[in-house]
Image (tube, helix red, strand yellow):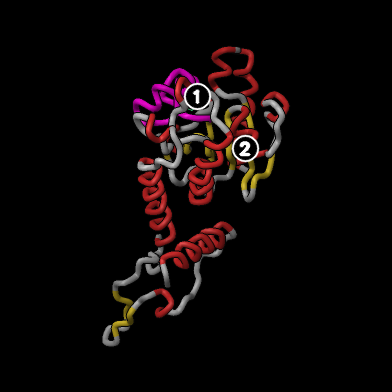
């Protein structure tokens, strides 16, 4: 199997897995396995990871790690040469809840981690209140590099950068995506409406449920927005538990 075919095959397997398929039979030659005649067992050459029970999971982690280093070396737009650190996202590759913010700010750029500044502290408080372990979710952004002076993401930057986000979503395969703020909300809904119109409802983006809500930074400016943010994340949590 060629590298490209292998990637396509793995994507197909991940989709099958999502629909509950746990076993699949493929001939050894197609997988690039040589059969050891004497012992009738498969020997090396298996880069598909299919001959282990956790092969699919291993491949997923590998692919996410590979994607992370692609993001960290990306120079596809001008932001790549201005950043201190690209911010791939964290924490769990098995997350059921995936949060998408706008772009790293100064603190995130300095540390290479998402939501570690003031907005991040508010998000952490929300996690505390709702009993969500930050290590069990995945937090990332529409853009992986900081726009200078925290300006709004530009259309061409969103277009160039979001294939990374899409690949993260495909591999992590969460139950619900929470879009924090207008830019991620518009990206997933295709709407040009403001966040107040879009928030708190369920949308479908490809295979995934998306719930747009207020960005924590907006809640710092206007504390009245905290309650709806809390409620929206709580409803996402209920969908996950269902
Ligand atoms: N704001 C964002 O949108 N993302 C971060 O990571 C931090 C602040």
Residue 90 shows in this picture: no
- Quadrant into which the C terminus falls: top right
Residue furthest out toward the front: 78
Q: In this view, does 238 lie above or below 51?
A: above
Mark 1 secondary-structure assignment:
helix
Range of residues picked out in magenta: 102-126
Q: Position of residue 176 (x, y in %)?
A: 59, 41
Instruction: Give the spatial CA distance, label 2 vs label 1.
Output: 21 Å
Q: In this view, does 202 lie above or below 15?
A: above
Location of mark 1 (residue): 123
Residue 111 among magenta residues: yes
Q: Where is residue 168 in the image (x, y as percent from the top left)?
A: 49, 46
Q: Residue at x 52, y 36 (%)?
A: 157
Q: Where is residue 194 in the image (x, y as percent from the top left)?
A: 69, 26
Q: Which residue is drawn at 38% across and 64% down?
A: 49
Q: Which residue is drawn at 38% across and 27% down?
A: 109
Q: In this view, does 35 lie to the left or right of 220?
A: left
Estimate how packed mark 2 is, as few (under 14), some (14 to 19) or many (20 or more) residues with alpha carbons within 10 Å: some
Q: Which label is found at residue 115?
A: none
Q: Which label is found at residue 187?
A: 2
Mark 2 / mark 1, whichever is N-terminal: 1
Does the magenta stretch mainly form a helix, a strand or a loop? helix
Front residue of 56 and 47: 47
Q: Is residue 37 left or right of residue 173?
A: left
Residue 77 shows in this picture: yes
């Amino acid at each position: 199997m060629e590298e490209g075919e292998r990637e396509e095959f793995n994507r197909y397997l991940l989709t099958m897995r999502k629909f509950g398929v746990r076993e699949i039979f493929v001939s050894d030659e197609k997988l690039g396995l040589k059969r050891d005649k004497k012992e009738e067992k498969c020997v090396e050459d298996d880069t598909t990871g299919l001959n282990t029970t956790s092969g699919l999971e291993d491949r997923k982690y590998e692919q996410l790690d590979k994607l992370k280093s692609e993001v960290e070396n990306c120079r596809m737009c001008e932001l790549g040469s201005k950043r201190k650190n690209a911010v791939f996202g964290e924490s769990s590759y098995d997350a059921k809840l995936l949060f998408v913010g706008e772009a790293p700010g100064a603190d995130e750029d300095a540390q290479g981690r998402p939501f570690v500044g003031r907005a991040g502290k508010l998000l952490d408080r929300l996690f505390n209140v709702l009993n969500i372990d930050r290590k069990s979710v995945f937090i990332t952004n529409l853009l992986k590099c900081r726009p200078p002076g925290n300006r709004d993401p530009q259309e061409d930057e969103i277009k160039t950068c979001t294939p990374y986000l899409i690949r993260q979503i495909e591999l992590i395969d969460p139950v619900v995506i929470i879009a924090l703020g207008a830019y991620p909300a518009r990206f997933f809904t295709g709407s040009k409406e403001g966040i107040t119109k879009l928030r708190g409802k369920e949308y479908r983006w490809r295979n995934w449920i998306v719930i747009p809500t207020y960005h924590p930074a907006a809640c710092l400016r206007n504390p009245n927005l905290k309650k709806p943010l809390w409620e929206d994340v709580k409803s996402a949590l209920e969908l996950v538990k269902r």
